[in-house]
Image (cartoon, rainbow, N blue to C red):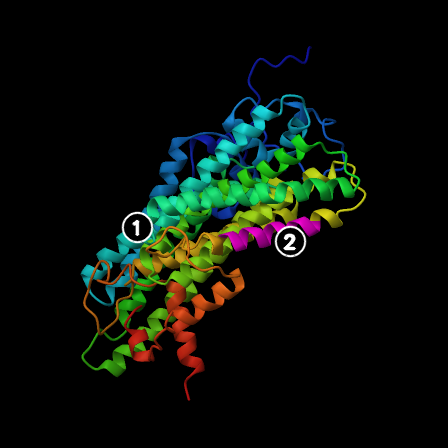
């Protein structure tokens, strides 16, 4: 399929197949419909998966996470847009602000589409696990299983999306090394900001022992990395 | 049958594959892109990110003072913007004190180091004029500060959600190191076109510049935290100051796993 053929229609299959020529055409032509398409896939895909994620705790938690999950993706993309647009040319790929923003949005769109496709499976798992109960031991075991499942699905979606982004960057730069450099720089920035945004927007699954909330009362107290550091310190001091 | 094709080509306009190599072997001005003028501030920002050779070439031309002035204005504006973000951690007086200290400190550090850079470049056999050296240093400041503005949203988010001065100080230092790396890369690329016999002088200067800026953060403290005075009352070496900061802040409270499990 050539670039112009997908200019009018933006099937998700083109994104998922990661056809570099087609994706390159996306970047080179201004088209607000593509932006709307990407936003739609992110809102619906990540939203559906978020709903499945939160449903184990409570239906209200499902609604909250359905809103928060796409929000984190969009805030991460926007928060790092300027930085990513500066890093791309500095590291050797000639992309402007709009193009780098769209490239990252496209990779998040792929991830969201994958997550959306997994949301019925996640919902099925949630439906089959023991519900939240007063027995803390059972709930804690279930909670761990659910956590691991989400980690596996989100990691899979992230890996595929970034692999597609790498293919696109390789096509744009003509060099595998340059493409890797830019991807790693973008990933580092997005992971750094995304982790903190996720920390602020907690809870997602919802701890059995805590109430259902959109944001925790102490959402803006402390940060993700401090918490990791404290937990690591606690582990190292444990005897 | 002629080759004229009245219909537009279905092939979209192609993005240039890569940006110009910083250390490209072609002498400055040999590539047509190098000679394209830089008419305004926006073009200067675009050029330093995408076509650094264009900036280096323009710095060698007569009347480069205007470009240097424009780049300096961008550097000052960007450092003020980043300074305001730094100030949001403590708020209050730091909202104006941090931008003043960051912009002033960077400019003062560059001024302090400029003469030594000129001497080092001359000792290395470089043909660069003082104006060109000034331009490269201003380019370093501009690239560094526009990158800092790129980091500003992340820095702001952490400023609003952490209470640890050490953590924020370390984060700003990491951002500064990354920005400085790219700035120094530009300076070094410009230097490589000046027919210098060796880069040892420049490498020495880079160390001096880094030390001066790091000491400036201590001389102008506090930049992140609060204080009753605008400038510090006692003098310290920056390593001592950092050590004191680490010892002064209470150790993080160790968290038992039960408490950790309650914050997913």
Q: Which residue is mark 1?
A: B91
Spatial separation of the CA atoms under disc 2 and disc 1 = 33 Å
Q: Does the stretch in magenta take in B205? A: yes
**Which element type, helix, strand or loop, lies under badge 1?**
loop
Asked if both marks, 2 and 1, belong to the same chain, the answer given is yes
- Left-right relation of A124 to B63: left
Q: Where residue A12 appears, x then y in whole percent?
A: 43, 44
Q: Where residue B160 appears, x then y in whole percent?
A: 32, 54
Q: Residue at x 72, y 44 (%)?
A: B120
The quadrant of the rendering that contains the N terminus of chain A is top right
The number of numbered badges drawn on the structure is 2
- Left-right relation of A150 to B118: left
Depth check, front residue: B221 or A145? B221
Predominant SS of the magenta segment: helix
Label 2 resides on the chain identified as B
In the picture as drawn, the residue positioned furthest to the front comes out as B233
The quadrant of the rendering that contains the C terminus of chain A is bottom left
Q: Where residue B239 appears, x then y in whole percent?
A: 53, 64
Q: Which residue is mark 2?
A: B207
B244 shown above or below B188:
below
Please tell me which of labels 2 and 1 falls first in the chain. 1
Q: Does the stretch in magenta take in B30? A: no
Q: Which residues are magenta?
A: B203-216
């Amino acid at each position: 399929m050539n670039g112009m053929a997908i200019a009018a229609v933006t099937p998700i299959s083109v994104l998922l197949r990661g056809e570099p020529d087609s994706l390159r055409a996306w970047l080179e032509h201004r088209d607000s419909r593509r932006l709307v398409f990407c936003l739609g896939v992110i809102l619906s895909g990540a939203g559906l998966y978020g709903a499945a994620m939160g449903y184990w705790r409570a239906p209200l938690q499902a609604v909250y996470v359905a809103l928060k999950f796409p929000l984190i993706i969009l805030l991460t993309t926007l928060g790092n847009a300027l930085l990513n647009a500066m890093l791309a040319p500095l590291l050797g790929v000639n992309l402007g602000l709009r193009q780098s923003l769209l490239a990252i949005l496209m990779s998040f769109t792929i991830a969201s589409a994958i997550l959306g496709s997994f949301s019925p499976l996640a919902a099925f798992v949630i439906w089959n696990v023991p519900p939240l109960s007063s027995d803390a031991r059972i709930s804690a075991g279930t909670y761990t299983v659910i956590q691991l499942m989400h980690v596996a699905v989100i990691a899979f979606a992230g890996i595929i999306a970034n692999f597609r982004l790498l293919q696109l960057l390789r096509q744009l730069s003509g060099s595998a090394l340059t493409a890797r450099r830019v991807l790693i720089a973008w990933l580092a920035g997005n992971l750094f900001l995304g982790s903190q945004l996720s920390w602020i927007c907690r809870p997602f699954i919802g701890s059995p022992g805590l109430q259902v909330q959109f944001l925790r009362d102490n959402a803006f107290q402390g940060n993700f990395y401090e918490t990791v550091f404290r937990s690591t310190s606690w582990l190292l001091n444990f005897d | 049958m002629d080759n004229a094709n009245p219909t537009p080509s279905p092939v979209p306009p192609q993005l240039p594959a890569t940006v110009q190599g910083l250390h490209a072997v072609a002498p400055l001005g040999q590539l047509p892109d190098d000679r394209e003028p830089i008419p305004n501030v926006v073009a200067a920002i675009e050029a330093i990110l995408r076509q650094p050779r264009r900036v280096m070439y323009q710095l060698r031309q007569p009347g480069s003072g205007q470009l240097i002035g424009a780049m300096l204005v961008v550097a000052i504006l960007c450092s003020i913007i980043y300074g305001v973000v730094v100030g949001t951690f403590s708020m209050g007086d730091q909202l104006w004190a941090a931008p003043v200290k960051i912009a002033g400190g960077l400019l003062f550090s560059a001024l302090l180091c400029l003469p030594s850079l000129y001497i080092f470049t001359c000792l290395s056999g470089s043909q660069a004029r003082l104006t060109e050296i000034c331009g490269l240093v201003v380019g370093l400041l501009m690239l560094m500060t526009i990158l800092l503005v790129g980091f500003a949203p992340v820095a702001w988010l952490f400023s609003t959600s952490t209470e640890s001065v050490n953590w924020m100080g370390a984060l700003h230092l990491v951002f500064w190191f990354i920005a400085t790396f790219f700035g120094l890369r530009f300076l070094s690329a410009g230097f490589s076109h000046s027919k210098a016999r060796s880069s040892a002088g420049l490498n020495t200067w880079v160390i001096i510049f880094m030390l001066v800026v790091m000491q400036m953060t201590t001389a102008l403290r506090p930049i992140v935290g609060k204080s009753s005075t605008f400038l510090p009352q006692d003098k310290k070496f920056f390593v001592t100051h950092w050590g004191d900061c680490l010892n002064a802040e209470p150790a993080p409270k160790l968290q038992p796993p039960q408490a950790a499990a309650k914050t997913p």
